[in-house]
Amino acid sequence: MNNGPILPPAYLFTALSMMVLLHLFIPVYEVTPPPWNMVGIIPLALGIAFNFGADTALKKYGTTVKPFKKSTALITTGVYKYSRNPMYLGTVLILIGVALLMGSLSPCIIIPGFIFIMDRLFIRAEEGMLNAQFGDAWTAYKAKVRRWL
């Protein structure tokens, strides 16, 4: 049975699991000791807010949230004014927040790999599809708004 490609939330949960395991079994250097580790709540909350804002906008404009599905609208407002990929940015902020909350350096090594995977497997393809679908409007938007932030 083929259920299609593995979607970004599965990569997020895998990354979070790997971060926890690294922290528990190989806690390299305490970067943010208590109570300073609580600063992780800030990027965690921002990440959740970015994801919620992006999901809300996608539903408002009636376009898909699923990667590799044809978009019916080019959204340039809300969180999309700040990032062309606010959901991916949100997931990275969630990972950063969790890493800070854990406090050790070892979970942080997962984050660059996660960014690389999201860029290679999803963002480049999605942006290519948006370029093909929206042409000049996409090019103008891309010139004004950065990929991440």
Image: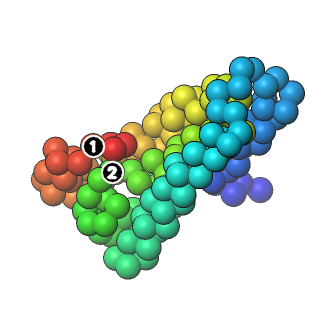
Q: Position of residue 138 (x, y in %)?
A: 20, 53
The answer for how far apart the CA atoms under marks 1 and 2 are is: 6 Å
Q: Position of residue 78 (x, y in %)?
A: 31, 66
Q: Is residue 74 above or below residue 83?
A: below
Numbered disc 2: secondary structure = loop
Q: Amino acid at mark 2?
A: Ser
Where does label 1 land, which residue? 146
| Residue furthest to the right | 25
Q: Amino acid at mark 1?
A: Arg
Question: What residue sits 51% from the left and 35% below the top?
Answer: 115
The answer to whether residue 67 is visible is no
Where does label 2 land, which residue? 83
Question: What residue sits 26% from the left and 66% below the top?
Answer: 77
Q: Is residue 25 above or below residue 141?
A: above
Question: What residue sits 33% from the left and 44% below the top?
Answer: 149
Question: What residue sits 38% from the left and 79% below the top?
Answer: 60
The quadrant in which residue 4 appears is: bottom right
| Residue furthest to the top | 29
Q: Position of residue 90 (x, y in %)?
A: 49, 52
Q: Are marks 1 and 2 in contact (CB under 8 Å)?
A: yes
Chain-order first, disc 1 or disc 2: 2
Q: Position of residue 94 (x, y in %)?
A: 58, 49
Q: In this rendering, would 81 be left or right of 69?
A: left
The answer to whether residue 45 is visible is yes
